[in-house]
Each structure stands twice: as C-alpha cells, then as structure tokens.
Amino acid sequence: MTIQKVQEVFQEPACGHNQAKSEKDRKKGCTKVATPGAAAGGCAFDGAKIALQPIVDAAHLVHGPIACEGNSWDNRSALSSGSRLYRTGFTTDINEMDVVYGGEKHLFKAIRQIRDEYHPPAIFLYQTCVPAIIGDDIESVARAASEKFGLPVIPVNAPGFAGGKNLGNKLAGEALLDYVIGTMEPEYTTLTDLNIIGEYNLSGELWQVKPLLDRLGIRISACISGDARYREVASSHRARAAMLVCSKAMINIARKMEERYGIPWFEGSFYGISDMSESLRNIAKLLVGRGAPADLLERTETLIASEEQEAWDALEAFRPALSGKRALLITGGVKSWSVVSALQEAGIEVVGTSVKKSTPEDKERISALMGEDAHMIETLTPREMYRMLADAEADILMAGGRSQFVALKAKVPFLDVNQERRFAFAGYKGMVTLVSEIHRALANPVFGLLRQPAPWQPECRLTPLV
C-alpha cells in the first residue's frame, strides 16, 4: 500500500516537474534517495508529522521508538487559538519485545488510553521505520480501533525510509484525502467559503491574514492545516474555492479536491505587499465566479488600497537605512521567490536565493523577479556560504536556524525566516515586521564591534592614558 501511494505521489500530474518529464522518466518517479548521513532536511515521517500536527484538537500518536517522536517534536512554531492537545506528544515507544513479537497490540492499547484520557475528536496514527520493517499493519489496527471505539483513527503510512520530508508532506495529504476530507458535513455553508491549503500558521501568520478576509466577508472553511479543527478539515469539501500556499507540500490535495468536489484553486503567497494584494484579488475572483456577490471585487480593491497605503507609510521609515543593502536568502519552496519579492519592495538587493527545494514554477517566478541573471543556488556548502558572507557579498543572511552559526562566524547579521522563527511575516503587517526585524539585525551595534581588530592584534593602536 505504501509503495503504491509513494508512486502515485511521485507521478503527481499537477506538478510541473512531472509534466516536463518523458513518459519513461515519469514512471520512474522522483526516485532520488538521500545519502546516509545527509538527510538533514528530514525524513518522510517528519514531513507527515509537521504537515498534520497543526490540526490542534486531534491527538497525534507516533508508532515507533521514542526517538522518532523526540526528534520531530516542536520543530515548528505552529500556533493554536484554542485546543492545546496537539502540543501533547504521544508515542508507543516500542521496545525489543515489540520488534520480536510485533507491536500491534501495544498500539491498540495506546489508542484506547488516548481515547479514555483525552477524548479527542480523532487520532492521527503515524507509521515509522521500525514497525514498518517488522510488518506492523497500522491500517488494520486503525480500522479495528475506529470500529471498537467509535472514533476516527487515521493511519498515516509514511515511514522515514520512504523518502524525504516533502514526500511525507504529500503522503500526509493522501491520508487526509483517503480518511478525513468529505467524511463530515459542515454545520452551515456560505457563498464565500474558502480553503487555505499548505498554510501552517507558523508564529501565527494565519492570524495576519484572517482579519483581512473577515473584513471582506470571506469565511475560512478550513485551513489545512494551520490552527485547524478536525471537523473543519473533514467538512472542507463544501468550500467554494481554495488557495494553495505551498505547492511543494500539498498540491495533491488541491488537485484532487478540484477533481472530486469541483473546488477551483490557485497558488499564491501571503509574503510581500504586492503578492498579498494579488492573492486577495485571486480569491475574490474565484469566489465571485462560484456565486459570491459581485461587489466583492470592488470591496477587495478598496481594502487593498487602504492596507497597501498603510504598509508603504510604515515601510518608508526603514527605506533610507535599508536601501542598497544586500541579502543572501537560503531557504526553499514558496519562500525562495515570495520573500525575494518582499525584500525588493523594501529596497533590498537579493544577491542569491536557494532553489534546492523549489519547483520549476518557483524558479520561473525568481527569474521574473530578479531577471535572467538571477543567482539561483542549488547547493551551497557552509564553506562557500562563509566565503560569500566574509567577502561582503551580502550584508545579512536570511536562512534557517542551522545556518546561523556560519553567519556568526562571518560576523554578519542573521535573520531566521524558516519554520523555527518566532515572528509572523505574512500579510501587510507581517511585511512591516519582516523589514523591521531586518533593520534591527543590521543596526545591531555588536557586529560593528566584532569586525574591529582585537586589542592584542597589531592593527589595533591603543591610545595611552594621560
């Protein structure tokens, strides 16, 4: 079953990368396997867990050794406006006896204990490498537990050895499509119900966007999966339109929901002023096309004009200090181009952006933003990154937490823009926050002190005391 799903995900027809392949290569799928010891980007299990854990009122049970739950724990600051159950770690913590005799009974007891003590609306059950190797059938256990307890138990068959984190994201999406979406009906519907797919509410970014939609009378039917409730996701098939935030992660959900339920979708970004405005326009167009009031388009333009003016006024204070500054952007996926757009609006030059996790469509957007001479970086070793920073090719490094030590060694300011960050950069207010954080990092006086020669170095001439 897992092999079949993996191949189905690899041959995703809505993926531009697959469309560009020959028929022979398309059948092979994305068969690139990580080199042992070089899988720092995360495994398939990790990708599935971080994609579904923001469903905040569900229990998330990891079937495997305790290290699997420990290593995947809290590596995303996805926030909740209600239930905190998603912050509780559940694992079967299988041991040597489970490996010898099988861990299915152990797993069934764990599901019963969660049901009795926490009463969640659903339990997501994650397969990991060890139980997958010994042959534990989590689908059968989930089915038996669902019948026994009258509780949805959703098997997420994404053992780590299946592939990388991005594959795990898509396998999580397949689990939602197979076992969750369409299994419940919403309490009510409106003509402006919208699904947001691939948004995880990192540091509360969804909350930067939701007030804008509320002012337009647009209701978020379900966010898959940031700050989501199980019932919202289960009844999301009644939405009128959908926005896909990250195609690398959940394009299969958007495509299959359009095929099954007729929900049109587009891919957009909430980063940067112009991209935020364009996303609002596209949302309004799709909804009006599905029967929403025609004046939604006019009201959207009025809102955009007001919010853009307020954001530009706020950014004007930072422009003199940031104009001409150079940034090196080491991230991936949708951020490889959406953050570029945001930085350019602030007057910052992007000297290079990584595209290791980007789709061909992402690269096309980068070329459109940065020109044909855009410096798109496939791989960048820490040594090469250090050289670029030390040679002053960039004034600031914007990347994930693992790269901050290279920046500190090069005595260059660093700003975390990946999933571990603690600031919300989405929407108009998020753009102002992003620019203010860049300004604060660049203006930090410690870097000026670090670049001065030490008192014991010959270049330093101390003034004698009189």
Image (cartoon, rainbow, N blue to C red):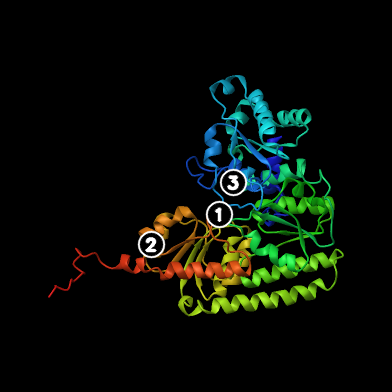
Q: How many other residues sit within 10 Å of disc 1, few (<14), some (14-19) or many (≥20)?
A: some
- What residue is pinned by disc 2? 387
Taking depth in this image into account, of 241 and 316 the one nearest to the observer is 316
Taking the spot 64% from the left edge, 48% from the top edge, the residue there is 54
When asked about the image quadrant of residue 66, the answer is top right
Work out which quarter of the rendered image holds the C terminus and state it.
bottom left
Report the Cα–Cα distance between label 2 and label 1. Answer: 25 Å
Name the residue furthest right. Answer: 291
Q: Is residue 337 left or right of residue 150?
A: left
- What residue is pinned by disc 3? 165
Disc 3 secondary structure class: helix
Q: Position of residue 398 (x, y in %)?
A: 49, 62
Disc 2 secondary structure class: helix
Residue 419: mark: 1
Q: How many other residues sit within 10 Å of disc 2, few (<14), some (14-19) or many (≥20)?
A: some
Of callouts 2 and 1, the N-terminal one: 2
Amino acid at circle 2:
Arg
Of callouts 3 and 2, the N-terminal one: 3
Q: Is residue 304 left or right of residue 356?
A: right
